[in-house]
Amino acid sequence: MPTLLTRTEPALDLLRGDPGAPALVTPTTRIDYAELHDRIDDRRAALGAGRRLVFLSGGNTVEAVVTYLAALAGGHPVLLLPPGIDGAALEPLVGRYAPDVVVRSDSTGFELTDVSGGAPHDFHPELTLLASTSGSTGSPKLVRLSRTNVRSNAASISEYLGLAPDDRAATTLPLGYCYGLSVVNSHLRSGASVSLTDRSIVEPEFWSEFAAVGATSFAGVPYTFELLETTDFAARDLPDLRYVTQAGGRLAPERVRALARLGRERGFDVVVMYGQTEATARMAYLPPALAETAAGAIGVPIPGGSFRIDERVGGGAPGEGELVYSGPNVMMGYAETSADLERGPELAELRTGDLARRREDGLIEITGRLSRFVKSFGLRLDLDRIERLLADDGLEARTVAQGERLIAFVLNDRLADAARAAIGRHTGLPAHAFDVRAIAEFPRTANGKPDHAALRAHAELLRATDATRRWDADAAAGDSPVLIPSAEDLRDLYAELLGRPDATVDDSFASLDGDSLNYVEVALRLEERIGALPADWPSRSIRSLAPAASRTPPGEPSDEAHDASPQGGRTRTRARRAADTVGALPRRRIARLETSVVLRAVAIVLIVATHADVVQLKGGAHLLLAVAGFNLARFRFSGPAVSAAEERHERRRRVRGLLRSAALIAVPAVLWIGGVALVARTYDPATVLLSNWMVPGATAWSEQWQFWFLEALIWSIVGLAVLFAVPGVTRLERRYPYASALAVLAIALVVRYVVSGGITPPSPMRYALPAIAWLIALGWLVARSTTLTRRAATSAVALATVPGFFGDPVREGIVIGGLGLLIWVTSLPVPAALAGAVGTAASASMFVYLTHWQVYPPIEEWSPPLAIVASFAVGLAAWWAWGRATGWLGRRRRQRTRAAA
């Protein structure tokens, strides 16, 4: 049994090692218990006589530990602070508590300064340690801990971990964090030793030193183990490692199980623990034998402690309530000024603020946090539970409350849609009742815990930034703010044009299943409201597109404040009504339309005019295929890279969107062609079913080939849906967008050359899917040509593949010219008076193509120009009627759904 050293005050009975046994170890230093006692005596003298308040800012150094123990031995209450704390953070604490001694001990050196001068402090006899209530440095509210608290908690930890003199813990956490300090206390109390280091676990040197000094354990918070997964820890040979402890927040059960399995294979235990500063450190632990089978539970109370669950407080489910702890390690109370330091123990038990339940196996499980709730739309939502549910869906997120609004943060914009859908599914909230924001990284406190206060501040900053960005721009330009539509007005526009009354300001054209059929109309109407559109507008939220004239200028009340005022709502309503009356922008003589829109309009005019024998400029339909591929890539499979966890959701969304696009073309086409076939007996069943290209033996053009364009487009879309249904393809395409499009184009070109038997396919083969699918792929490649180098490469591909396809230089020139514009020019100038007509022609282009075969033949014989006009008139009428009919059907379906609900 080790000899108890009793010279001076035995540092609260924490030093129980044999005099010659190691106590503190570094790669270059070994201090045994005898030397440690000598150093404590010397430092105690330096701290001064009487009881003094000591502020210790220290890293994991020998001098910091010696000073801490010397303060305990001398009866000096000590506040441990992070190393390198700056004056601004220290000032509130100094002002409130007036320390007598300030000590700095870190890798740069040691400094002890006597700063006393005022009236002496009055301390309660039991007061031993002060600790911050959070990871925020400089928090003026402190926890008061007694010598009984410190002694009892160290003894309990030592008991349930089975600590012995041959144990040696590496300091992976700061001394100023109660968890890190408890490692030092429990090991010295057991006669064991501590390996002092400030290295991070991601540094190879940490593990080299860990092995060299024979360390047997280390402690970590959840973030520690996230970092650990980025290292080669699992493959390292650490024969002395006996156990790993985890506390400081909930570690995902799957991570606990994975670590426990690794420990079982490598010979170390995993001990999950639960605690709070207010309980000196630890309150519960999960026995290591249960780490795999009971991951997610905090376990059982530590020796000497007990739990009860107060179901009167916060409980939502039967058996759930606030977790209340009793034990000798419960704090004396809080301190907010120096006068509080003379107060005695004030608590018999600790209300943890955590919601918990007792499982059937008797273990305690934390289910939420009382302060982590938001009341929204009459629902009381547990933010921690929402985070866990999102994690189960493969989405790492952090949630905070902003008033009665739920705000979720994800690590990338590409995760926002999935998170938004998951939150709606799990909470039942409508999409406009919460926000999902992207953030570069989740903020953490100095202790590595999630910093929800920083997230709330960031959410408020984002809201304010959204409200002032455009106002600032107008002010900087010297312009007066113009009354223009709000995000809500634009949402109404999307809802009307896309037939989506469920649209929210956080939706986008793509997320609302917009496609090439309604793309042009939405783009034109948006341009009328807000002016020139950004190139990526289809994927941007309505909120981000909305100009800020109706938003709040800096220094003015927010929209929420306006709405809360007696006149607020009326003021905003008047502004919106004025915006609708005045219009968004001054009238322009020249408008700019997206190149793809202009090409669609020009191509359909060329198609009809050529068929009516007004001109002979073929190639428009083949150009339209490339434009269709371009738009498919933009609307149906665009976005940044996705992880393996996200791929399943994104794959389903992409396939569903592609099949919907195919159906939107196929249904009206089959109805029209089938109707004509019934009346005029002109089309075969294969043509009606848009499958004429599959019929073998065709050697010449016939009326059965009239709808080749629609066949090629629909079957290409179906083929792409099949391709993206293959696991891994979506993730690969997102990660390598240009290379993926290039690979698909290469395959399509091989098919073209094989079925054509050369460069120029014979007619009607040049209208069959195998020979023309490459044009869809080429349009896809154009959409992925986002850099100068890629545009140049795509131009070279077009110049290498188009010539020779028709054997007609003019026809090939039209396709190459259109592709060149699509590659290099984002938008084209159009007389403002014609912009609406151009956009309408582009929007109705499919219906004009579909119906013109029955319109122009009887008219062209006596007036070809009139045949063109009649073709567009019928096509536009069909487009309008189809839009009205589908809109009505959609409204009826939604009404029935609501009625059934």
Image: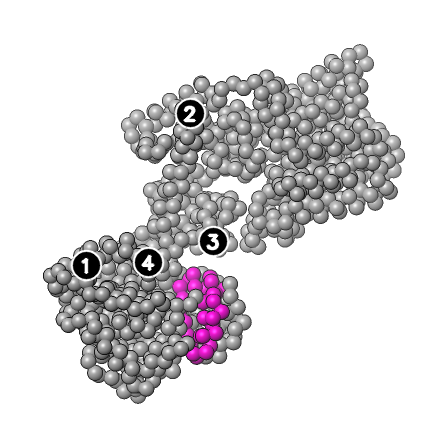
Crowding at dot 1, Cα within 10 Å, few <14 / some 14-19 / many 20+, comes out as: some
Type of the residue with mark 1: Tyr
SS category of the residue bearing label 3 = loop
User: Where is residue 188 drawn, in percent x and y?
Assistant: 31, 77
User: Where is residue 72 drawn, in percent x and y?
Assistant: 22, 72
- What range of the chain is rendered magenta? 201-229
Q: Name the N-terminal-most of marks 2 and 4.
A: 4
Q: Name the N-terminal-most of marks 1 and 4.
A: 1
Q: Is residue 170 above or below residue 607?
A: below
Crowding at dot 2, Cα within 10 Å, few <14 / some 14-19 / many 20+, comes out as: few
Q: Name the N-terminal-most of marks 3 and 4.
A: 4
Type of the residue with mark 4: Gly
Q: CA distance from mark 2 to mark 1?
A: 53 Å
Type of the residue with mark 2: Asp
- What residue is pinned by disc 3? 396
The N terminus lies in quadrant: bottom left
Left or right of 691 in this view: 86:
left
Pointer 3 with pointer 4, Cβ within 8 A: no
User: Where is residue 699 drawn, in percent x and y?
Assistant: 88, 34
The structure residue drawn at horizontal position 39% and vertical position 68%, both measured from the top left corner, is 198
- What residue is pinned by disc 2? 479
- Residue 135 is tagged as 4
Q: CA distance from mark 1 to mark 3?
A: 40 Å
SS category of the residue bearing label 2 = loop
Q: CA distance from mark 3 to mark 4?
A: 22 Å
The structure residue drawn at horizontal position 36% and vertical position 31%, both measured from the top left corner, is 553
